[in-house]
Image (cartoon, rainbow, N blue to C red):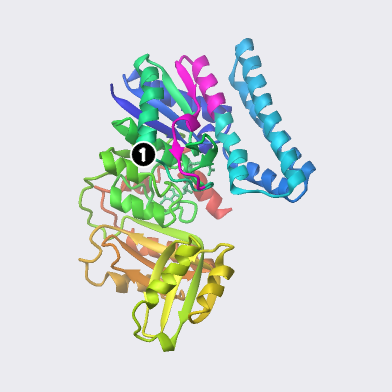
Amino acid sequence: MSLVVMKFGGTSVEDPAAINRTAAIVAGRVALGKTPIVVVSAMAKVTDQLLRAAACSAQGDKCGALAISSRLRARHRDTACLLLKNQEDTVELQKLIDEKFDSLDEILRGLAAILELTPRISDLIVSYGERLSSRIVAAAFRERGIDAAHVDARDIIVTDSQYQKAVPIDAAIEKRAHEKLLPLTAAGKVPVMGGFIASNEAGITTTLGRGGSDFTGALIGGAMNAEAIEIWTDVDGIMTTDPRVCPDALRVKVISFEEAAELAYFGAKVLHPATILPAVKKNIPVLVLNSRNPTCEGTRITSLAPHCKSPFKCIAVKKKLSIIDVVASRMLMSHGYLKEIFTIFDKHQCPVDMVSTSEVSVSLTVDSNDKLPLIAADLSKLADVKYEGRKALVCMVGEDIRGQHGIAAQVFNAVRHVNVRMISQGASEINMSFMIEEDDAEEAVRSLHAAFFQDPDPLVFDVEARKTGNREQGSGVSEAAAAATR
Ligand code: ADP
Ligand code: ASP
Ligand code: MG
């Protein structure tokens, strides 16, 4: 059985037209003799709106929360209605949608009474996005001749109980995936499930963190030993940088697991950072593809990427970071000092992105978050502490950067007009990163892109699109370019 996991992001299921395109893509795979397992995100922007509804309720704004829910109900009902022609199917799906929104409204009302939004309740509320979209997509597939079977992802993806960022339990997922999915695929059915949502061993709903549907796709691919994991999105693949920032970005045809993981971790939103892990474990290729331009070959992420003449493959940017300076002359040279600092970050469960040390000071970068004042208060027991937000980390990814002379000079020459706060190279051979002000990030990326992607290696980058100016209609790149100039 040539099993392929196909994950469709929010824009690929955002409205009836998108769901129709998605159905055609899946039908195409079935026609090729493949056995797809489909993972879908919530319809575009639904997760954000559910989180807003939750926040309104928790602040006592019950009417505001219910108004958001009512707009979402109408959007889902309308989508279902436009997609389904069969009267019985439509009635059944509308009933299901109404039941789900009735129970969501009940939770929102309860929340407005208790005025406390816990991470657990937040996960329950956002889970409605994927629970609804997967039902609608499965019904639409069935009407279009795909023998789809809806599966509740929470029955398969088992995690720990770290709500909002739960960690999957591989062995349990593998067991459940085999139990629930194999009988369906063996019967020629196409399982359709929501991404992002999961449950802990007690059956309580958890989520894998924002953008986590990619991760679900990869977890299912790993558990089922799929021959490929396809991530269908709204751009032609992994691009040399975010095409919304740099309309000139080129498609990367092939990239290694390590490079893709680095890119995803350092902010390239196209892929959730954990997506690569299950694929690497089982050496399953990951393909990033465009559901608006399905004939484009996309990006292939694999263990064996060809050697590239260009020093870098991509530029990623991670925003909303803070820099923390810890200055302590009396600690000079004392051992155990760094350990004490990291123990504090550990206590607050705050991951550190970049570290730089001198004789008297340590600078660290972290995601800006509400724990920062508490972390700073703890650190100030050790030393003088300053922290500043609104920073961005620019990360240049490419294999074998270390081996190339003069690369750092070229990078910093390209951003000579920008104030660089911290630099890191060497932690991995494939990444050179530096920290700048958030407001400078987009200009820095465009300058770096102009400097390093003038003469791209055709083996690795899609240079044809640039030569012919052929940005196909709906390829995402042209739309992103338009968005960038709006
Ligand atoms: P989905 O909803 O399909 O998961 P996302 O919005 O999460 O899609 O990710 C796709 C978006 O990622 C693109 O629209 C693009 O703006 C952004 N992006 C950021 N960096 C890159 C990159 N290097 N290559 C491609 N897209 C990128
Ligand atoms: N719907 C979730 C989010 O918006 C997960 C995903 O789309 O990957 O974060
Ligand atoms: Mg995504």
Residue 229 visible: no
For residue 294, side relative to residue 348 (left or right): left
The residue nearer to you, when weighing 211 against 382, is 382
Q: Check if residue 149 falls in the magenta segment.
A: yes
The residue nearer to you, when weighing 56 against 266, is 56
Q: Position of residue 171 (x, y in %)?
A: 35, 36
Q: Position of residue 396 (x, y in %)?
A: 35, 61
Q: Position of residue 412 (x, y in %)?
A: 36, 73
Vertical arrangement, residue 478 with respect to residue 259, above or below:
above
The quadrant where residue 126 appears: top right
For residue 322, side relative to residue 427 (left or right): right
- Residue placed farthest to the bottom in the image? 330
For residue 270, side relative to residue 105 (left or right): left
The quadrant where residue 226 appears: top left
The kind of residue on which mark 1 rests is Asp
Asked if the residue at label 1 sits under 8 Å from ligand 2, the reply is no
Query: Which residue is label 1 attached to?
Result: 170
Vertical arrangement, residue 295 with respect to residue 181, above or below:
below
Q: Check if residue 9 falls in the magenta segment.
A: no
Q: How many numbered marks, from 0 up?
A: 1
- Residue placed farthest to the right in the image? 63
Vertical arrangement, residue 395 with respect to residue 19, above or below:
below
Q: Which residue is at 50% across, 50% downward?
A: 481
Q: Secondary structure at mark 1?
A: helix
Is the residue marked by circle 1 packed among few (<14), some (14-19), or many (20+) residues within 10 Å?
some
Q: Position of residue 161 (x, y in %)?
A: 50, 45
User: Magenta part of the protein: which range?
Assistant: 134-162
Q: Which residue is at 55% across, 50% downward?
A: 483
Residue 6 visible: yes
The residue nearer to you, when weighing 167 against 399, is 167
For residue 305, side relative to residue 343 (left or right): left
Q: Which residue is at 38% across, 28% downward?
A: 177
